[in-house]
Amino acid sequence: MGQNLTETLEKSTDAARATALLRDLVAAQREGEAAVQALISTRLTDSGCSVRAVDYEPATVPVRGEFASQEAGSTGQRRAIIGELPGDPDLPSLLMFAHPDGEPVAGTERWTHDPFGGEVENGRLYGWGIADDLAGCAAAVLALEALARSPVPMGRAVFASTPSKRYARGVAALLHQGLQADASLYLHPAESGVGMREIKAVASGQLEFAITVTGRLPDTTEPGHTAFSHLGVNPLDKALVIRDALMALAEARAARIRHPLIEAVVGRATNLHVSNMKCGEMRRFSKLVETCEMGCALSFPPGETMDEVRAEVEAAVAAAADADPFLSTHRPVVTWRSGVTGAEVPQDHPLYLTTHAAVRAVTGDAPHVNPMHTSSDIRNPMIEAGIACVGLGCLGGDLSQNDCHDEWVDLDDFHKMVAVTARVARDWCGGARGDGS
């Protein structure tokens, strides 16, 4: 690609410029998502991109391989911002995307840094939503600014700032409206503790569901049920019957469903757990209740479909109910809350090779695949439009979505993220295929 372009990229994505934009985005977060999108739009326009806003309703996006109940999904009109640098149509195009929406602001009294001040301490920059996903938005904007200054022929480069949280489906909305590219890059800080030493190229699918089990109260008008409990059916006891069936299914699937990359990390390619149970309130311990509800989640590797996995769960629950005299006539009810399909990019794919070469050139280390980011947004371009996608991001932590405080990114790793993003865009859109030249 030439030394002149390399120098242009280095000058355009220097540390001070990158840090300043990230701090500006953190400050804009005080006013909310619209202010963040406005700042992104202004920076893209100033860099020479053609910019447009797309308003959409998440509930009307015709997604493939995904669903969310009304309780789990996003409601109300949302806005995505698209910035595009035109390029040579005979050269490859790239779609970069990140999400500008953060968690609802709450609990800031626990923070030891100003959530919107962009404070820097010990090499970390702190701010609300900075690791989820303002750093990704900043990296994409800075990459396009760098590419805009380059005279080297390249294909079309696009950044889509797309709402994502709570099934906002921003990138899916744009893809279904016709946004296309030859490859895609998802930019989001890494929550694994590894940062720019990894590439997200595998995303497992996930299903979340609830199971409601009904019991029978003892036939008494007494306010307490303890002396009569043997005359009723405790829904907690019957919920454990279903829970045992689910655990047996989990072990059977772990022995049968294979994915080498996932197994190499955790020893199995699929998992299922019952994460919580609700059976009355923590008071009046002498009184039984009529129902017990379990909250469950199941991860499954690329290659399996949601329909296949749902059918297995429903069959296991039905078999357990059939074998129980009470449950056979009082059937448990499975309620599917949300689900996404897994996807992956093989390590010999040109996009992966290009990204691997860029990370190695900037950091000096050969990155590895992180296969453990279940339901990662890298799945969206692949599932919705058949566009290969990998993800990368700097080291970050203490995310607000995990009920932590003082969310941060490592500044040095963020600067590497910016440089890698620019290099991937440069090499891919310039026609390189993995050698980084």
Image: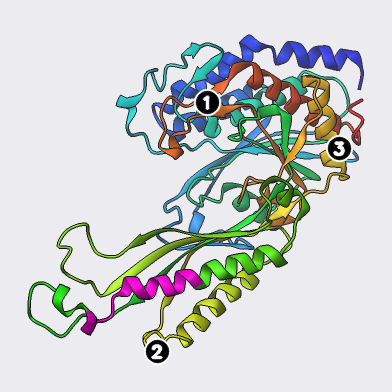
Magenta segment's dominant SS is helix
Q: Which residue is mark 1?
A: 39
44 sits to left or right of 157: left
The residue depicted at 47 percent of the width and 17 percent of the height is 118
Dot 2: element: loop
Sooner in the amino-acid sequence: mark 1 or mark 2: 1
Q: Which residue is mark 3?
A: 353
Residue 294 sits above or below residue 324 on the image: above
Write down the region rendered in magenta.
230-244
Query: In this orientation, which residue lies closer to the viewer: 396 or 262?
Result: 262
Query: In this orientation, which residue lies closer to the viewer: 149 or 214?
Result: 214
Q: What percent of the width, then of the height, locates residue 48? A: 69, 24
Q: Amino acid at mark 1?
A: Leu
The residue depicted at 91 percent of the width and 36 percent of the height is 433
Dot 3: element: helix
Q: Residues within 10 Å of mark 2 (few under 14, many from 20)?
A: few
Q: What percent of the width, then of the height, locates residue 194? A: 66, 30
Q: What percent of the width, then of the height, locates residue 329? A: 38, 90
Q: Which residue is mark 2?
A: 325
Sooner in the amino-acid sequence: mark 2 or mark 3: 2
The C terminus sits in image quarter: top right
Q: Tell me where residue 255 sits by quadrant.
A: bottom right
Residue 47 sits above or below residue 107 on the image: above
Residue 307 is one of the magenta-drawn residues: no
Q: Would residue 17 be visible to someone looking at this image? A: yes
Q: Residues within 10 Å of mark 1 (few under 14, many from 20)?
A: some
Query: In this orientation, which residue lies closer to the viewer: 191 or 37?
Result: 191
Give the label, 1 or 2, closer to the camera.
2
Task: Give me the C-alpha separation between circle 2 and circle 3.
Answer: 57 Å
Q: Amino acid at mark 3?
A: Leu
